[in-house]
Image (spheres, rainbow, N blue to C red):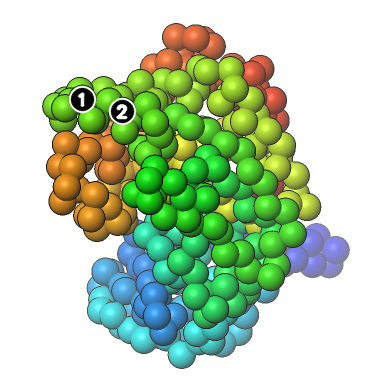
Amino acid sequence: MKKNLSYYLLLLFCVSGLFVSCGDDDDDKTTIGYSGKDVSGDAGIARDKETKKAVLSVTSDKAWELYAGTTAEDIDMNTPCLTGDGKGSFDLSVDATKRQLFLFKNSEGQALLAERLLPVNGYNFRDLGGIKNSEGKYVRWGKLFRTDEMNKLSDADLAYLASTGLKTVVDFRTATEKEGGLGGMLPAAPDKLPSTVKNPYDLEINAGNIFSDEIIGSISKGLSEEETAQIMVDAYIEMVSYDDYVAKYKEFFKYVQDESSLPLSYHCSAGKDRTGVATMLILSALGVDKETIMKDYMLSKNYIAGKYDTYLKFYPQIAPLVTVDEKYLNAAYNKIDEKYGSMAKFLTETLGVDIQKMKQLYLY
């Protein structure tokens, strides 16, 4: 009798859908919210920037169910908030003022979803959640946000961000970028922060600042687009090799590795260069492969489209400065290998990153 009871208890444990699976195949292993085949690409959540209305987009023909909660651990699996029989776009009847996390489930597997691009005024406010690493783990949703300057947030935006519990904001911009200058060419852009933020930190990094005196001076000399692109390549190399900038990234990781600082957002002006390098370092520490990191980096190309149109109208040669390019980030990768031996050594020996702690904090 004891043997039979143990058998049935084990069977019950194995089929509990949200957290544990018994499959021997790697694709069948379960982490929090994820199981079976990776179906995270079969659906996505988007919210309107103004109304915050949520829409689910499904690309699979299979029947599905959607569940909601504020965290992965408190998703109510008893009652789906929406069900469907196939692909399409579906309005979600959820609180527009608060961010939520969803679990999408079909016959092949299940995955956690939330909007990648947050519905706030700006161009590049993104959640790192849901990115898959080389071990089959996923970055936790709602813990790390990368963004452009946070100066255009409305009251509704601030309330929405407060619902995430955002505690810490790290700003890589220089004083001129925040306070304005360059003869009025650069307007003041002080951050607007939600009430939940208790830890605003300034970690000024000038490399990657497209309005730096050095870059503006070079452009005034009539550089070609190719020469301007080289300025960006050089800036990425400086970010990971110049002692002062490396020290700023080391301090940044102190906050990233402090659980009491989470959730945390970090940004520069466009959220693509200094922020892009910071994201490369974070995702590398979490075991995400270079191809996936590059794909995330290149999303900025579309997300910041239009942000600098006014400047491009008068200075078309700055086009390489206001976008992203694989050769920029590759320059940082190559410099890290050349100067430090490997990404792993740079992270652990130079930046003081505890890889195991990072994975415990940020992976499902």
The relative height of residue 217 versus residue 2 in the rendered view (above or below) is above
Using the image as rendered, state which of residue 18 and residue 121 is in the foreground.
121
- Which amino acid type corresponds to the residue marked 2 in the rendered image? Gly
In this orientation, which residue lies closer to the viewer: 348 or 171?
Answer: 171
SS type, badge 1: loop
User: What residue is drawn where x is 40% and y is 34%?
Assistant: 212
Which kind of residue does numbered mark 1 sit on? Lys
> Hey, which quadrant is residue 116 in on the image?
bottom left
Q: Is residue 63 above or below residue 124?
A: below
Q: Is residue 317 above or below residue 311?
A: above
- Location of mark 2 (residue): 217
Residue at 28% in and 69% down: 60
Residue 275 shown left or right of residue 294 in the figure = right
Say whether residue 316 is visible.
yes
Do the residues under discs 1 and 2 have CB atoms within 8 angstroms? yes
Q: Is residue 4 visible?
A: no
Circle 2 Cα neighbour tier, 10 Å, few/some/many (<14 / 14–19 / ≥20): few
Looking at this view, is 339 or 210 the one in front?
Answer: 210
Q: Is residue 235 left or right of residue 305?
A: right
Task: Using the rendered view, name the quadrant where residue 214 is placed.
Answer: top left
Residue 333 in the image, given as x and y percentages of width and height: 41, 22
